[in-house]
Amino acid sequence: MTYLKVSEWVTKKGVTNRRCLILVLIVGICGATNYITNGDFEQTLSVGWIQSQSGAGSIITRGTTYNPDPDYEVYLYRPAGNGFAQLEQTADIPTTNIDFTVAAKLYAWDNNVGAWGVGAVVVAYLDDASSLLGETRICHRSIGCPWQDAPDCHIIDVNDNLWHTYDFNIAQELVNIPAVNPSDVAKVKVSLLAYTLDC
């Protein structure tokens, strides 16, 4: 089995606070083959992962102190304002009949009208050419976040800041995303995302 661990992200801004916390202990695309490289973050983030950031103050790092266990997790931080912190990896998959698992602690909060934040683990379904077909978004959203279910997107809402394990068989999950033809899915992209927007 392959596991991807991600830990914590917090977003805030002076008096106008927006917090997004993402703690992911285990993320995995499991089967007889290991589909995620460095899924436990025991190696540096440059092994298997692509980091991207937008806006001043975003942080992506790894450490062993974000969770009581002694293993590594990843910390994503996005302060208030327009921007994001993201860690992602794309994996080729031979079939959609494989399992995805994530143990996560997600949180987003905002007290500024017109602004919003989100903490998410996103599983994107891609075709052979890496074109986006649809997504599953496990997320905690602040008020005002426009994300919603659609034919090409399934939202799994997180309504607290506690640890939960989310797992699903990808083939069964695609029933929730009718715009995606399972036979077209050749890859998945797993993203850990801290995103804020000031409107």
Image (spheres, rainbow, N blue to C red):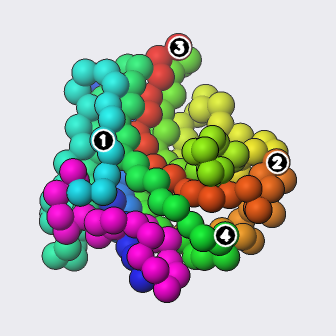
Q: Measure the C-alpha gap from mark 4 to mark 2.
A: 15 Å
Quick one: which residue is furthest to the front in this view? Answer: 129
Could you say which quadrant of the image residue 175 lies in? bottom right
List x then y, in percent, for residue 84: 39, 31
Provide the residue span drawn in magenta: 26-46
SS label for mark 4 = loop
Q: Quadrant of the N terminus?
A: bottom left
Q: Measure the C-alpha gap from mark 4 to mark 1.
A: 26 Å
Q: Measure the C-alpha gap from mark 3 to mark 2.
A: 30 Å
Residue with the mark numbered 4:
96
User: Residue drawn at (65%, 72%), measured in percent from left and top?
Assistant: 95
Quick one: which residue is furthest to the top in this view? Answer: 199
Q: Could you tell which of marks 3 and 2 lies nearer the N-terminus?
A: 2
Residue with the mark numbered 2:
179
Q: Nearer the viewer, mark 1 or mark 3?
A: 1
Residue with the mark numbered 3:
199
Could you say which quadrant of the image residue 7 lies in? bottom left
Q: Nearer the viewer, mark 4 or mark 1?
A: 4
Amino acid type, mark 4: Thr
Mark 4 packing: few (<14 Cα in 10 Å), some, or many (20+)? many
- Which residue occupies the foreground of this view, 195 or 91? 91
Q: Nearer the viewer, mark 4 or mark 3?
A: 4
Residue with the mark numbered 1:
51
SS label for mark 1 = strand
